[in-house]
Structures are given as structure tokens and as C-alpha cells.
Amino acid sequence: MKRVDDFRLRLGKHELVPIMIGGMGVDISSADLAVEVARLGGVGHISDAMIKTVSDRRYKTKFVKEKLALYKYNVENEDKSPVKFDLGKLVEATRLHVEEAMSRKKGDGMIFINCMEKLTMNAPKETLKVRMEAAMDSGIEGITLAAGLHLGSFALIEEHPRFRDVQLGIIVSSVRALQLFLKKSMRTGRLPDYIVVEGPLAGGHLGFGMDWAKYDLATIVAEVIQFLKNEHLDIPVIPAGGIFTGSDATAFLEAGAAAVQVATRFTVSEECGLPEKVKQEYFKASEDDIEVNQISPTGYPMRMIKSSPGIGSGIRPNCEAYGYLLDANGRCAYVTAYNREVALHPDARKISVMDKTCLCTHMRNFDIWTCGHLTYRLKDTTRKAADGSYQLLTAEHIFKDYQFSTEQKIALPE
Ligand SMILES: Cc1cc2nc3c(=O)[nH]c(=O)nc-3n(C[C@H](O)[C@H](O)[C@H](O)COP(=O)(O)O)c2cc1C
């Protein structure tokens, strides 16, 4: 009987255990997690979502305070278009985070960074270019282009000296999205080095509508593999979303996938960036506690635990400090929804905004508990203590369970 360890992922000169841990912002897929996964021979991701905040928390910088001080005059203003990111500071924050992770790397695995196009940052092209180039300058080994179609992203970095040396991957949820991407990026003469196919059971934002439940990862993966075959393109395909056991992963590898991307099982690892009390919420969640809703201002459906404290909270937008979701014209769907509620309830001291959430502040504070569909099975992967709390797992334990287990078995910790 085959297991994941019978397969290898080849990327450039590297031969890897075919397990990639997906990017999880804001700092949920921490540098600690990525470093550990690389040590074990797989691919780990850090994320550049809200990197200035991450840098402040991890490396004692003051980026957020400085930005807020600069734009404090605008806090009461509905128009957020003047609130811009200082590109030099963005470079500095990216460098700190990437260099720190890369300097700690040991072993034969790799460390990539997850860059979401939907973090439009009030200047989508300029900021994305700077983010990707700073990561390449700092030695990142791969960039996974996520949350967005990324039709122009390769072109933004084609002049960079590492454009052909760094591994570049794309996340898609359909053959159609892949076709669009390939057509557009053909101009740069550069194909992606890997394609992550993310199905409807994934965590974070979904590349599907609210009819996500109609889709099935295995079917989409088979379509993508067939399409690439027809086009004579040899690009590794990496399925993601709901791959919970080593046997689930092996089934994809036997069907022609080059590796799998997983995330949810690692949310309860010691190395994961979520606070311990939130990890316990992930363990405790039942299937009914998890929903896909439309409160993300990005416009994409997002999966989360229903009791996330950020849902329905009517906090004042904090774009002067953060502002990662401001579009090219300085607008964010949460700012619009918040202003509407303020206008409707002029005398209220506290308002509630049900249809959108302030994703920046709430993700920063770990108050939106985004998760994969199979989060409700996490409790079956560990032991419960007498006080009702669940034992956290090491990333090594989870990684090796994926790598070596067979027959749908899940190894419990010592
Ligand atoms: C807590 C959490 C946060 C996530 N954040 C991101 C993100 O910032 N960017 C991204 O591309 N994918 C994100 N994802 C998706 C994962 O990278 C991954 O592709 C997917 O969740 C894999 O499915 P699984 O969680 O069922 O294993 C997130 C997933 C989780 C569970």
C-alpha cells in the first residue's frame, strides 16, 4: 500500500517530500511553522499579509504607529484615498520578515511566501510589485500568488534578476482561471513552476461563489491535469482543501498530483501563529459551528467559525493604521457598510455591522477565526485533558502523520 513518502515533488533542483503547508495570513502560517516544515523536507509558507503589523509584533518595529501618526488627521474622514503605504517601509518590513525566516532555515525543504492580490493596499500594482521584489531580494525561494487572478503579476517582476530563478506558483480553483492566467503570463515567456488547485473545502477566502458545495476538488484537479496534458505542459499540480489524512493525500498523488497543499491540520500545531485560546476553539468546533459567509470586504466568500468575535462587530475602520483592503480608489466595502450604519443610527454609541467585517483589524487581533471545512475533525487528531482542553501537536507530528500514515489512520500524540 502506497503512502505519501513513496512520492517526491521536484521543483527546480529540489527534491521534496510532497507536502506543502499553505500560506495563512495574518502570521498564522508563522516563520516558526515554515522553518520546521522546511527542516522536515517539505515546503512551508510565510505570508506577507499585513506585514508591517507582523514586523511590529515580531521584530519590535513601529511601522503601524508611524503610519497612524502620519494620517491621524484623516481618521474621522469617510474618504480614505489619501491613506497610502510608504513603499520604502513596506520593503523594510518584508525584508525583516523574510530574512529572519530564511536565516533560520535548515534542511532540504523550501520556504515560500504567500502573496494575495486582494490586498490591494490603495495602490494595487505598486504595492504588489514592491512586496514580491523585496521578498526575492531577501532570499525567498518561492512566491505563491493567491487570492485574485493575478493576470498581471508576473509582468510586474519580470525585470527582477531572480525572476527566472525563484519558484513562482499560482492558486486557481478552475481550469478557466488557469487558462486566463497562462494566456496573460505567456507574454513574459515564463510559465508557473507549480499550480495549486484549491477546492471548496479550504480555509480562508474561496475561489467559488456561495454555491461552493456543488464543486469537488478531485474533479477540478482531474480537469486541470487533463488540460495541461492536452497542452503538452509539464507543470506540477498541487491540490488543496479538505485533504485531512495521509491516505487522502496519497489518493491525489496516485491520481497524478505532484504534491498536496494542506493547512487546517497545522492550525493546532505549537508552531502556528494563532493564540493558544483560539487553537482550542478550532479543536472544539463542530460541523455546525463552521460557515461560509460573505462578510469579507474582498468580495470573496470566506469560511470561518460562527462564533468569531469579529462577526457583527461595528468597530471604526482603522485604515489610517492598516488599510490593506483599500482598492485603487481608497474604498473598502467595510468602510461603506460602517458609514451606512452610522448614518442610520446617528445617536447610537455603539453600532453593529452585520454584512461586512473590518478584516484588517480583526485578522490582526485573531478575531476572525477562518478555518477549513474539516476543522471539526481536529478533535480526533489529539488527546483531551481532564480539564476539557485539547493537547497541541508539534508540526513535526502532523507532518509525519501525513507523510507515513495509511488506511485513513491518524496518529495521536504521545
Ligand atoms: C486559518 C487559515 C488561513 C488561511 N489563509 C490563507 C491566506 O492568507 N492566503 C491563502 O492563499 N490561503 C489561505 N488559506 C488556505 C490555505 O493556504 C490552504 O490552501 C487550504 O486551507 C488547504 O485546505 P485545508 O485547510 O483543508 O488543508 C488559509 C487557510 C486557513 C485554514
Image (cartoon, helix red, strand yellow):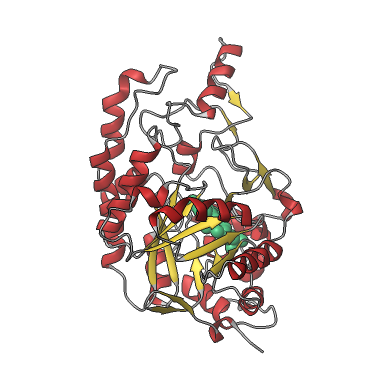
- Is residue 57 found left or right of 114 in the rendered image? left
Q: Position of residue 66 (x, y in %)?
A: 25, 33
| Ligand 1 quarter of the rendering | bottom right
Q: Nearer the viewer, residue 154 or 74?
A: 154
How many labels sit on residues? 0
Question: Can residue 389 be seen by looking at this rendering?
Answer: no
Considering only vertical position in the picture, is 367 above or below 348?
below
Q: Nearer the viewer, residue 205 or 385?
A: 205
Q: Position of residue 341 (x, y in %)?
A: 59, 18
**Residue at left offset 43%, top offset 71%:** 37
Q: Position of residue 310 (x, y in %)?
A: 56, 37
- Is residue 151 found left or right of 381 in the rendered image? left
Image quarter of residue 140: bottom left
Q: Quadrant of the C terminus?
A: bottom right
Q: Position of residue 144 (x, y in %)?
A: 44, 58
Q: Quadrant of the N terminus?
A: bottom right
Q: Nearer the viewer, residue 179 or 60?
A: 179
